[in-house]
Image: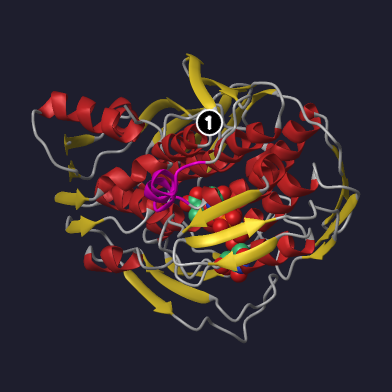
Amino acid sequence: MNSLLKDAQKAGERVGLKSDKIVINGGKPLRGRIEVRGAKNLATKAMVAALLGETPSLLKDVPDISDVGVVTGMLNAYGVSVTQVAPGELMLDPSNVLKAHFAEIDALAGSSRIPILFCGPLLHRLGEALIPDLGGCRIGDRPIDFHLDALRAFGAIVDKSYEGIRLTAPNGLKGAEIHLPYPSVGATEQVLLTAVRAEGVTELKNAAIEPEIMDLIAILQKMGAIINVEPNRVIFIEGVDELRGYTHRALFDRNEAASWASAALATEGDIFVGGAKQQELMTFLNIFRKVGGAFDIHEDGIRFYHPGGALKPVVVETDVHPGFMTDWQQPLIVALTKAEGVSIVHETVYENRFGFTDALIEMGADIVVHKDGLYGLTRRVPQRPLEQAAVITGPTPLHGADIRVPDLRGGFSHLIAALTAEGQSTISNVGIISRGYEHFIDKLDALGADFIYEG
Ligand code: EPU
């Protein structure tokens, strides 16, 4: 049973109700300890990397989230057996890779962005790849042009059909010089997963260097790859003839850690996030401190808390690593509704990531979204044509409302908003949160939230 169904079932048993919503009585600080496990945005890619090995791989600290279920289903469809050998530990055996039935992958691909990353490994293993329409959160157009251009540079032939995109490589894949127009996380992963087995050397310029990418490179090195990360976003990959399986513990989920940190701040609470580490969260920690949050770094995690006193407004620009991640802005904005003054959040990564603010405004927040961005201000991050800005004026008390979750991170910020609000909120479509937040219902329970989950 996948995590989504398990979460729903567990909570359903607790309250004896059936449907996908949560009723929250706000106003109670979240206090206690929770654990974060491996990052959604690493574990799912590490699972795809296992396709490249000649022998089985063992991935540890895999989160029990529905995106992992989707990738497991995709791998199964291609003949890779995925077995849970211990809690959070998956054995991935690619010894019998085979062509999948289109209907099987089509049914799964519609709920995730990961299938595009199967292209390189499938071209190496099977000589062709078929990518159906992609899913994932609705946070902008999310095109795949960088991916397809990179695959063409390796020698792949791309045909678009009514089913999706079919790729073949009649002459094999050869190392290439690739310059990404933007340091895209997914496109960088695409190049890595393709170049490691391509013939010759690949030079990738303007690569993304997120910690999850560095962890993927570590995994590929364990498998036998030769990858050099040079200064200025340049990565050299020397193709090899064969890769073996890996044993690896996934990097912790820094997006989940930052989300619970914002929940602690917004609810005036105190949360110890076990498994969180300082290094990968440095940029977040600086902003958290500037807003008025406090944290203590421990060996086994980070304690995030509201130390008392007023919260302060900030100006934040989302950016690629080492900047402030786009995934951190939504939960933080709830805390910013409590800050005294005007905060500005510039979203420079995606063109549609403020949709969740509509619900916050309904709950009493003073937020104005500038759909074409706010220019003429001192900026650190280069302006992008797609960017928007949210201006948050606080403090504004929030009151309960009926909300429908639009996407993963926006959904988590709605949970936080409801937890801070006066009165009762009903949030529907919360299942989407299980795509990336492991056992969030149990964690809310452990932190003392007052809610009923209707699963
Ligand atoms: N882009 C293109 N063409 C492409 C690829 C990307 O124009 O071919 C653009 C996108 O439209 C966007 C920008 O480049 O404007 C950045 O996209 P990127 O490729 O970096 O993002 P992604 O790989 O699709 C991953 C995470 C996101 C996270 C971003 C940024 C996964 C599965 N997703 O997406 O995570 O926000 O990197 O760090 O790893 C989430 O976890 O909720 C989530 C959305």
Which colouring convention does the figure follow?
secondary structure
**Residue 196 in picture, x, y percent from top left:** 80, 42
Ligand 1 lies under 8 Å from the Cβ of mark 1: no
Q: Which residue is mark 1?
A: 79
Q: Farthest residue toward the bottom? A: 376
For numbered disc 1, what is the local secondary structure? loop
Q: Is residue 156 magenta?
A: no
Please tell me in which quadrant of the rendered image residue 445 appears: top left
The span picked out in magenta is 100-112
- Magenta stretch: dominant secondary structure: helix
Q: State the quadrant of the C terminus.
A: top left
Please tell me in which quadrant of the rendered image residue 279 appears: top right
In-image side of 4 versus 287 (left or right): left
The reply to whether residue 340 is visible in this rendering is yes
Residue ID at (34%, 66%): 357
Q: Farthest residue toward the top? A: 86
